[in-house]
Image: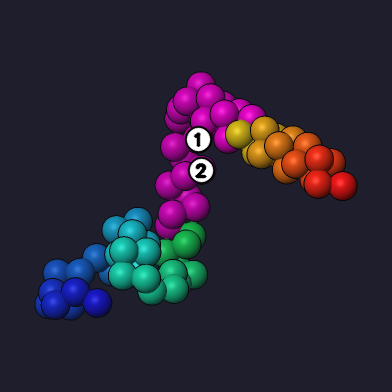
Amino acid sequence: MANWPKELLAPCGTRSAYNRHLRYGEPTCEECRKAHSEHIRNWCKSNPERFKAIYTAGNRKQREKRKAAKSAEAVAE
């Protein structure tokens, strides 16, 4: 944990606190996970084209990885 006074740290239940948990390797609390999920949900609704591009690109990469793993598995047999 940082050596910051507690009153300067963002309270749990905010995205800042969620990021702080991640930055310091702490487990995220339920309130922070909910705040992060809400932010992502709102971002996806307000940026549908960007969300679609990111989501489909991620799926494409996963499909390519699975396909490569299957072909490597077939070669090994």
Residue 18 sits above or below residue 55 on the image: below
- The amino acid pointed to by label 2 is Arg
Residue 9 visible within the image: yes
Which residue appears farthest toward the top when viewing the image? Answer: 49
Give residue 29's mark: none
Horizontal side of 71 relative to 58 (left or right) equals right
Q: Residue at x 61, y 34 (%)?
A: 61
Horizontal side of 48 relative to 75 (left or right) equals left
Residue 38 sits above or below residue 14 on the image: above
Q: Which residue is mark 1?
A: 44
- How many callouts does the rendering have? 2
Q: Residue at x 51, y 21 (%)?
A: 49
**Residue 72, percent from left and from top:** 75, 41
Give residue 41's mark: 2
Say what secondary structure mark 1 lies in. Answer: helix
**Residue 40, percent from left and from top:** 47, 44
Which residue appears farthest toward the right when viewing the image? Answer: 77
Say what secondary structure mark 2 lies in. Answer: helix
Name the magenta segment's main secondary structure.
Answer: helix
**Residue 62, percent from left and from top:** 65, 38
Q: Marks 1/2: CA distance?
A: 5 Å
Q: Is residue 33 magenta?
A: no
Horizontal side of 11 relative to 56 (left or right) equals left
Residues at circles 1 and 2 in contact by the CB criterion of under 8 Å = yes
- The amino acid pointed to by label 1 is Cys
Segment tinted magenta in the rendering: 35-60
Q: Considering depth in this image, is 57 or 67 the residue closer to the camera?
A: 67
Q: Is residue 56 magenta?
A: yes
Residue 48 visible within the image: no
Residue 71 sits above or below residue 32 on the image: above
